[in-house]
């Protein structure tokens, strides 16, 4: 029975909005997971930093605990002054020595003035050669612009029934004519 109507095409009733919604959901899920992973990493780093700080303070606190709780240890005024003086250090053999100020040579050595990077001239880094843009490339970009104008709406969405493959095929067809 020929009524002049076109046959049923299931692609005409395909709902693109559902795919767009699913795509947005997956994207937001990925973003949420990335954000949670970054938060977990930050928390872990803070915990490690706190543990390291506690371990560093623990040695100091243990030494203080021993000195305060041991009744056999008594410090004279001179010994307290030595403990609180930042310029004095005690050697492993018990000898108290003063820290010397850095000499001129030490200052020069640490300045980096004579480091290899400052002595050698700045050599340009080997840059990777890029490909020249050819006439075909320029024409292809024009053809793609024309094909996109034909197959996309004003907002940039693909027209119903159009695909990216069709756009590229049409662009190549236009390119051959140029």
Image (cartoon, rainbow, N blue to C red):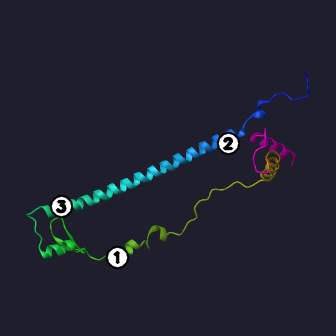
* Residue 94 in picture, x, y percent from top left: 15, 67
* Residue 146 in picture, x, y percent from top left: 82, 49
According to the image, label 2 marks what residue? 20
Disc 3 + disc 1, Cβ < 8 Å = no
- Say above or below: 10 vs 143: above
Q: Is mark 1 on a helix, strand or loop?
A: helix
Q: Which of 158 and 108 is in front in this view?
A: 158
According to the image, label 1 marks what residue? 105
- Say above or below: 55 vs 175: below
Q: Nearer the viewer, residue 96 or 144?
A: 144
* Residue 101 in picture, x, y percent from top left: 29, 77
Lower sequence index among marks 2 and 1: 2
According to the image, label 3 marks what residue? 65
As drawn, the label of residue 95 is: none
Q: Quadrant for residue 113, please give it.
A: bottom left
Start-end of magenta stretch: 154-178
Q: Residues within 10 Å of mark 1 (few under 14, many from 20)?
A: few
Which residue is found at the position 23% from the left and 59% from the top?
Answer: 59
Lower sequence index among marks 2 and 3: 2
Which residue is found at the position 59% from the left and 42% from the top?
Answer: 26
Which residue is found at the position 53% from the left and 69% from the top?
Answer: 121
Considering every residue shown, the one lying at the far top of the view is 1
Q: Quadrant for residue 126, please give it.
A: bottom right
Q: Gap between marks 2 and 3, in whole Å? A: 65 Å
Depth check, mark 3 against mark 1: the one in front is: 3
Q: What element carries label 2?
A: helix
Which residue is found at the position 36% from the left and 75% from the top?
Answer: 107
Q: Is mark 3 on a helix, strand or loop?
A: helix
- Say above or below: 91 vs 167: below
Q: Gap between marks 3 and 1, in whole Å? A: 41 Å
């Amino acid at each position: 029975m020929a009524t002049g109507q076109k046959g049923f095409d299931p692609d005409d009733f395909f709902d693109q909005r559902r795919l767009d919604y699913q795509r947005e959901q997956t994207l937001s899920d990925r973003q949420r997971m990335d954000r949670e992973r970054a938060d977990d990493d930050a928390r872990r780093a803070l915990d490690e930093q706190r543990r390291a700080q506690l371990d560093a303070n623990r040695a100091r606190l243990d030494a203080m605990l021993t000195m305060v709780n041991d009744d056999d240890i008594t410090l004279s005024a001179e010994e307290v002054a030595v403990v609180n003086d930042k310029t004095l250090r005690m050697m492993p053999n018990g000898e108290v020595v003063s820290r010397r100020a850095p000499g001129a040579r030490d200052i020069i050595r640490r300045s980096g003035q004579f480091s290899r990077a400052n002595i050698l001239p700045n050599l340009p880094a080997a840059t990777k050669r890029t490909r020249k843009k050819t006439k075909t490339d320029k024409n292809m970009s024009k053809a793609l612009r024309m094909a996109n104008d034909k197959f996309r709406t004003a907002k940039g969405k693909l027209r119903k029934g159009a695909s990216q493959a069709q756009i590229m095929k049409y662009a190549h067809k236009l390119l051959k004519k140029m």
